[in-house]
Image: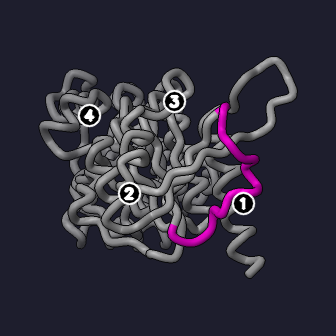
């Protein structure tokens, strides 16, 4: 029998403390966040992230133990493989807690119940400690507001093999459980840092990254820019674009900056930021593979 606790009350203090991690202040104070879903939890573990607590819906766990669950939906293994997985988790110092269905629904994201929620210690590191591949592009995302957009951008960076993502002056926390969920757990495997505009500009200057900014009024078409190699692909928020500090730094000769645009043939004047990220990331990959 795997060592575990049991919680049945929705008013349990540990349960309420964990649920508060959906709020940014609790995450900042503790350095912890929530990971929804077995697949995402396993990706955190594979990336070496500390799994502090693992909360499991006792009914779904029972079905998984008997091999009567949808492994693709829950991300949990079955039968003997489940026992081995949980034993490995416990050996790593994780506390396992079984929750009644009402208690689990108190903790789970919205109406989704995949039977598994983890508490992990996770916070993107500062740029001063960032070391990344010099021959691959990085994505810089400034002022992103929606967790779904940031999560999708992280999935793109992972899929396209980019060197990393800098979340610049973020208006959503990269450790937000909704970002983790939208990224399908790739937030843990993508090289990630968080910084302000001044720090990010200084990093681009010190690493001699060419900055390619996507803007509606960009000077050249997106596919004509040199996106592969030591570039920083800069994306601003849909509402505000990029900070004037970038052009000021370019005018002062601190960074090399050029802007690109994507054609817009309909009523909208810009693409969703995650769609733009995908177009430019894969164009950078195409260019790299063409040489």
Name the N-terminal-most of marks 1 and 2.
Answer: 2
248 lies above or below 20: below
Residue at (33, 50) in percent of width and height:
200
The segment highlighted magenta reads: 216-230
| Farthest-out residue, top | 267
Q: Is residue 8 left or right of residue 151?
A: left
Q: Does 288 appear above or below 234?
A: below
Q: 126 or 246, which lies in front?
A: 246
Local SS, label 3 = loop
The residue indicated by pointer 2 is 192
Q: Give SS at disc 1.
A: helix
Tell me the CA gap for discs 1 and 3: 21 Å
Residue 44 on image: x %, y %: 39, 60
Residue 136 image offset from top left, x and y in percent: 53, 71
Q: Quadrant of residue 2?
A: bottom left
Provide the residue designation for mark 3.
241
Q: Is residue 181 visible?
A: yes
Q: Which label sits on residue 35? A: none
Identify the element where label 2 is drawn: strand
| Residue 208 drawn at (x, y percent) | 40, 67
Q: Which mark is residue 283?
A: 1
Residue at the disc numbered 4: 21
The residue nearer to you, when weighing 85 against 157, is 157
Of circles 4 and 2, the one toward us is 2
Mark earlier in primary sequence (3, 2): 2
User: Is label 1 or label 4 in front?
Assistant: 1
138 is within the stretch colored magenta: no
Is there CB contact under 8 Å for labels 1 and 4? no
Write the residue at 76% across / 21% down: 268
């Amino acid at each position: 029998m795997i060592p575990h606790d049991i919680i049945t009350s929705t008013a349990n203090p540990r349960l309420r403390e964990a649920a508060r991690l959906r709020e940014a202040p609790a995450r900042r104070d503790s350095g912890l966040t929530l990971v929804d879903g077995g697949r995402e939890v396993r990706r955190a573990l594979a990336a070496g992230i500390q799994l502090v607590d693992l909360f499991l819906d006792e009914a779904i766990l029972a079905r998984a133990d008997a091999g009567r669950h949808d492994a693709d939906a829950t991300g949990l293994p079955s039968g003997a493989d489940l026992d081995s997985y949980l034993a490995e988790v416990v050996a790593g110092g994780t506390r396992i807690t079984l929750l009644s269905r009402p208690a689990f629904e108190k903790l789970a994201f919205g109406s989704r119940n995949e039977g598994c929620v983890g508490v992990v210690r996770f916070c993107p590191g500062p740029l001063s400690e960032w070391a990344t591949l010099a021959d691959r592009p990085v994505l810089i995302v400034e002022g992103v507001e929606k967790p779904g957009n940031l999560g999708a951008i992280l999935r793109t960076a992972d899929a396209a093999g980019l060197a990393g993502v800098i979340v610049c002056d973020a208006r959503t926390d990269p450790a937000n459980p909704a970002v983790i969920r939208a990224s399908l757990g790739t937030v843990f495997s993508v090289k990630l840092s968080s910084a302000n505009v001044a720090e990010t500009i200084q990093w681009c200057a010190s690493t001699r990254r060419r900055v390619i900014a996507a803007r509606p009024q960009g000077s050249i078409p997106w596919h004509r820019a040199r996106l592969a190699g030591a570039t920083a692909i800069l994306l601003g928020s849909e509402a505000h674009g990029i900070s004037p500090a970038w052009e000021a730094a370019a005018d002062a000769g601190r960074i090399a900056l050029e802007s690109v645009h994507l054609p817009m043939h309909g009523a909208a004047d810009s693409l969703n930021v995650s769609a733009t990220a995908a177009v430019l990331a894969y164009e950078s990959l195409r260019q790299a593979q063409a040489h």
